Image (tube, coloured by chain):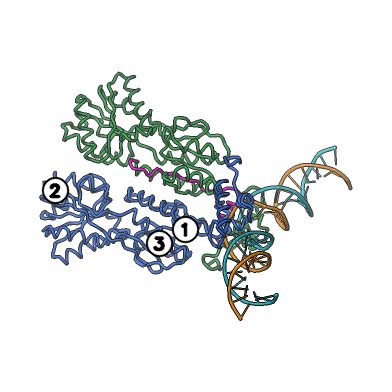
Chain colours: A green, B blue, C cyan, D orange
DNA sequence: GGCGGTTGTCGAAGCGCTTCACCGCAGCTC
DNA sequence: GAGCTGCGGTGAAGCGCTTCGACAACCGCC
């Protein structure tokens, strides 16, 4: 019952008139950039509520040179961990809202041109870049455009940037440490598709490095090999792995789409889980939990929250650490005990 | 090499000066709302390119009362068909960009308040609402706010709105027709989780109706039953179904997360596929194709494209049909021949 | 050669907001 | 009591764009 037709904008002038103050006073009440007496503030806030006032986003952006919007650049490329992306996106939106920001969805296929457009038109204040590769062409662009950005994953050269990521190296180590502690002496990493390694995606390389390092340190034999997607391909790659290395008793799987097929295929390859082969995965927990799979969960929500928080700090010109690595944890379930 | 510091905005005045015309002329060249001589247009466009001009989004929105942004309200609730949502989102962003619009991501958990905020602040010109239920509280709100919207899925009362959806009823019919043509006389629908039916989600109800209708028409016995998520639950529900109706020879599966488990469980329940039981699914094609599963694909991209196109029409005040149903198709593969 | 009709361009008025400079007033200090 | 300082409030100047009305310049056409 605001008394005005639907679709008509309530302006700051309406609020000012209703509260008997100047428009600038309303603005200061809402932004908190000046001290305003409790009495006036109260009256203004009451009017805001009574009229259902929402500041016009365009006008606000124009005057303040802040859009209150951040861009989320999603990969949307095949071979991505889809549910993780979704959960991540949710966390980003929710956290951004908590900071009074909205989220603009940009697909990576618009590429550098998209970043140019977004920066040039002042549509957003900052950028969240997902699926960053070790040598990513968008990273120098971000520097050049002076667009505040936070990267998910981290590139080879992260100077002057802010990155958030799960500590995949540590995750790889954790898996091997767990298997070694259970007495396994020959372990294998069934990794991401070869294409993911080839395009230099950080998480895949770092996990592999972690597995190898921990194995070396603990005196465990470790082999690693990529794994393509699709049940048939997974079965083939797994079979090949076990044919080449029949004495492997510990398996680390880092490929969301391979988790189900691997568990299904092992028995048919003459391996009982966990008696003959223990299985550990690096994957979303929802995927692991129903199958009783030991895993290092990918904390998508936490990464999203951290990324937004960091970006907000950068927008406020606060200094932020160049690299933020989240400590992985390992949840033990049936497949490795 | 634009000759100005990174981060500084190039304004329409800069372009006008560079091209030796008035700012309004630049605006008219860019919008095409007035006829401009070829010579002037050429000069202006050259200056635009030379300076790397992008109109300031806020200013444009303020002056034209159009944000050139649409909101995509995603469900992000558990039990959703995640990969489908992603593909849909991609299609939406790409299509919107083709119409010179950007996409703002809104999560459904902000609920009606989110719609109010978005409408009040003129952040977006229109809304795409996903995962619409038969009785959805946001639908009347959309009408009340006079916010142009397009629904994905369709509510019980769609007057004055625009909805896009796969014709799930027809999809259900198609599955049964296919099975009947192959000689099956007793078929079953293994559907969505019970909660999905309970909250009145359109696609689940309509598919069930289609299955039942086609079965009646063709003289086929049909039973339908919900199916919970997770491998163990799927196996349980499937086993129960086959125990109650051991003579079922045709199975329609409409539950993304059930597809894999069903195919895995059938042999262990003494049913070979397709000799003993033919299986047809309504699910994303990527999920069906690798397993050789006959399916009616959910055309996420097409739905996304259609939805954006419809919304653009509405924004241009063109009339749009209340309901747009996409014709399903059935792809025959190994599990039903 | 004066008239109406196009066509191409310009100037100026806002769109709704933030923010700066200013101002009255109270409460100090010296 | 003069001179500060800080607080709470106002008015006005833009932010960069679109769009309206005005207006030259040109076109025939009687």
Residue range in magenta is A51-79
Parent chain of label 1? B
For residue B310, the mark is: 3
**Front residue of this view, candidates B3 and B330:** B3
Q: Position of residue B223 (x, y in %)?
A: 17, 59
First reached walking from the N terminus: tag 2 or tag 3: 2
Residue at left offset 66%, top offset 55%: A24
Q: Which secondary structure lies at badge 1?
A: helix
Graded by Cα atoms within 10 Å as few (under 14), some (14 to 19) or many (20 or more), the crowding at tag 1 reads: many
Q: Which residue is mark 2?
A: B273
**Front residue of this view, candidates A151 and A169:** A151
For residue A15, the mark is: none
For residue B115, the mark is: 1
Q: Which secondary structure lies at badge 2?
A: loop
Figure quadrant of residue B183: bottom left
Is circle 1 on the same chain as circle 2?
A: yes
Question: Where is B66 relative to B239, above or below?
Answer: below
Q: Within the magenta stretch, is there residue A206?
A: no
From the image, state whether disc 3 or disc 1 is nearer to you. 3
From the image, state whether disc 2 or disc 3 is nearer to you. 3
First reached walking from the N terminus: tag 3 or tag 1: 1
Q: Position of residue B275 (x, y in %)?
A: 10, 50
Figure quadrant of residue B36: bottom right
Residue at left offset 18%, top offset 31%: A271
Question: Where is A304 relative to B101, above or below?
Answer: above
Parent chain of label 3? B
**Front residue of this view, candidates B20 and A227:** B20
Parent chain of label 2? B
Report the Cα–Cα distance between label 3 and label 1. 19 Å
Q: Quadrant of the C terminus of chain A?
A: top left
How many marks are shown on the rendered structure? 3
């Amino acid at each position: 019952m605001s008394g005005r037709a639907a679709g008509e904008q309530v302006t700051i002038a309406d609020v000012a008139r209703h509260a008997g103050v100047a428009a600038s006073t309303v603005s200061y009440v809402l932004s908190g950039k000046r001290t305003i007496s409790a009495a006036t503030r109260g009256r203004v806030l009451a009017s805001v509520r009574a009229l259902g006032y929402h500041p016009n986003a365009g006008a606000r952006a124009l005057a303040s040179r802040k859009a209150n919007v951040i861009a989320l650049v999603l990969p949307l490329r095949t071979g991505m961990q889809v549910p993780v992306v979704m959960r991540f996106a949710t966390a980003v939106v929710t956290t951004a809202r908590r900071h009074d920001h909205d989220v603009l969805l940009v697909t990576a296929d618009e590429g550098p041109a998209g970043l140019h457009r977004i920066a040039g038109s002042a549509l957003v204040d900052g950028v969240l870049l997902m699926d960053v590769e070790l040598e990513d062409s968008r990273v120098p662009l971000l520097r050049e455009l002076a667009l505040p950005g936070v990267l998910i994953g981290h590139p080879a050269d992260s100077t002057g940037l802010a990155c958030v990521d799960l500590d995949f190296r540590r995750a790889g180590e954790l898996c091997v440490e767990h298997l070694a502690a259970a007495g396994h002496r020959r372990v294998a990493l069934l990794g991401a598709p070869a294409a993911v390694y080839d395009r230099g995606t950080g998480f895949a390389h770092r996990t592999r490095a972690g597995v190898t390092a921990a194995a070396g340190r603990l005196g465990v034999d470790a082999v690693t090999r990529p794994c393509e997607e699709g049940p048939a391909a997974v079965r083939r790659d797994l079979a090949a792995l076990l044919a080449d290395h029949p004495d492997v008793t510990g398996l680390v799987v880092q490929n969301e789409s391979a988790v189900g097929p691997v568990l299904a295929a092992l028995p048919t390859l003459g391996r009982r889980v966990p008696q003959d082969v223990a299985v550990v995965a690096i994957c979303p927990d929802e995927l692991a939990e129903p199958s009783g799979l030991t895993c290092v969960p990918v904390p998508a929500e936490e990464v999203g929250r951290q990324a937004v928080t960091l970006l907000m700090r950068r927008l406020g010109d606060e200094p932020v650490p160049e690299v933020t690595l989240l400590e992985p944890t390992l949840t033990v379930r049936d497949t490795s005990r």
